[in-house]
Image (spheres, grey):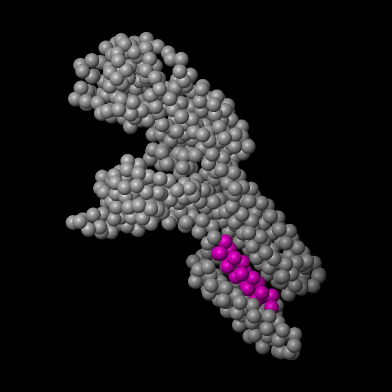
Amino acid sequence: MSRKQKKILIRIIIAAVLLFACIAAEHIFALPWWANLCMFLVPYIIIGYDILKKSAKGIMRGQIFDENFLMAIATIGAFALGEYPEAAAVMLFYQTGELFQSVAVGKSRRSISALMDIRPDYANVERDGEIVQVAPDEVAAGSEIIVKAGEKVPIDGIIVDGSTTLDTAALTGESVPVDAAEGSEIKSGCINMTGLIRVRTTKEFGESTASKILELVENSGARKSRSENFISKFARYYTPAVCIGAASLAVVVPLLRMVFGASADWGDWVMRALTFLVISCPCALVISIPLSFFAGIGCASSRGVLVKGSNYLEALSRTRAVVFDKTGTMTKGVFEVVGIHHNSLEDKMLLEYAALAESGSNHPIAKSIFRALGEAPDKSRLQNAEEISGYGVKAVIDGKSVAVGNERLMESVGVKRKDCHGNGTLVHIAIDGEYAGHILIADIVKPNAKKALDLLRECGVKKTVMLTGDSEKAAAAVAEKIGADKHYASLLPADKVDRVEELLLEQQRGETLAFVGDGLNDAPVLSRADVGIAMGALGSDAAIEAADVVLMDDDPVKISLAIRIAKKCMRIVYENIVFAIGVKLLCLVLGALGIANMWLAIFADVGVMVIAVLNAIRALKIK
């Protein structure tokens, strides 16, 4: 509990003790009205002076119709009618509800602030033989930093010396430590648990994992859902409407009674109007709905799922189709050369041509060819290379025209390719217009891929579709293994967008489509889908930037977790909307009819708010 919350709690306790003492004194002693007024004003001012101050400031700024104004006018009116205990009690219980709400918001905020602990305070650099601490944003990419045991890794990089065990819980939500040694990639935000390591940074601080995560979380509150926007608009019109209704009860109804020859009963109708005002306070809606979304985003963050705004959480809850890229999403993206077939050259020579042509690429397929070759090729043999997106590479090697890529590239250069009996990705090689063979490269399906799709169906997803640039044979094998409903193969980046466009047209009204990807070429599709989900740990910066949801540990099972959190969050939101509006309307009718007194009004305001807030914080917990 914060210092401010503790001060309010002390005021509540003091005001409550004084109020009960005043009520007892009123019943024991026959005091004049002015003595009772002065006596009850003491607890009222102790507990409500800040509400009166806020109300006065709101009136001066022209912001009249808010909950502070409603509380102030209702309690002052109650004092004017001689309802001293009720006036002080309304303010006491209102402040109690506000404190409860503040504590609940703090609890939700702490679920996210735990993630904020990844923010590094400094980086260790070596200068003149001594280790000195500098601000992380002062360290350039390519510099060497030292991370001691127990310290946070400040910037992304590669370990160049030492080995250790890393605590990645703040990034991925997983509590199992990860071993890292020389050559291992390391993400900022991890905690070095054991040995001292030396790291060569690969990015500047502003582009590092921790910095990007912090930016995503800090901006998540800016993107409001339709439900939040509805509540904001509702409160904007609702509060003036009930103020007009209360004024009508206090003035118009008595005047009409007088016109028709009945007694005006001014005191009774003014009391009904004041009760009406207390009941009408929209705190339960205005507070509990954003709190529900905040709790849902916090719960997801603590499990390694970053949601960029409550609007995406709402869209996730309505997901009925999930489309995903194959490589790096449903597969590990770790390719291995498993065969070289139909080659007219020696295996090593064919690998050299392929490696030289792909030497400017960081694609997983290119890396697998480099590993299979086992040595760095002589780049002086390479005269020039032209990468053709979605096709492959054309190059001049040893003075020969070399084409390395898929079947579409072979067709474009007029070379007849040969198929393979094995499952995997084929890299065809043509030299001087003649087919020279192909390299078979296989990717490994993620162990949880099939489970992920089964869990999605349990979450209400009707259709799962896999898109890939690989051959039909390789795509069909993976799709069958993971249980995808449909797959599309041999797609260019633009083709993936077209397929998603077609699938979006098939969606029913109110249903959304999510796309899951990890690569640079997935960014356009991530942006086009209703919800774009990026694999954060291995995914490209462009994919993470374009996505609406980021999975920090690349586990596809987290997709269903995100949907479950979203569904529970939206269920709580709708429960609170129906409950709060239903109780409010019922009590408003009772108040207008004179059946509800000020104590029922207190329940309709503070009681409903407490119940709604208690319900909202359930979104913090989900299995």
Count of marks, rendered view: 0
Residue 232 visible somewhere in the drawing: no
Residue 49 visible somewhere in the drawing: yes
Q: Which residue is painted at 33% across and 32% down in the image?
A: 362
Q: Residue 317's x, y, as percent?
A: 59, 42
Tell me: 64 left or right of 264.
Answer: left
Q: Residue 551's x, y, as percent?
A: 47, 42
Q: Which residue is painted at 63% across and 85% down in the image?
A: 38
Q: Which residue is painted at 63% across and 37% down in the image?
A: 458
Magenta stretch, residue numbers: 85-104
Tell me: 192 left or right of 302.
Answer: left
* Depth order, front residue of 444/460: 444
* Depth order, front residue of 425/527: 425
Tell me: 491 left or right of 352.
Answer: right
**View extreme (right): residue:** 261
Q: Give the answer, above or below, for where 486 lies relative to 142.
A: above
Q: Residue 555's x, y, as percent?
A: 49, 39
* Depth order, front residue of 196/545: 196
Q: Residue 101's x, y, as percent?
A: 58, 63
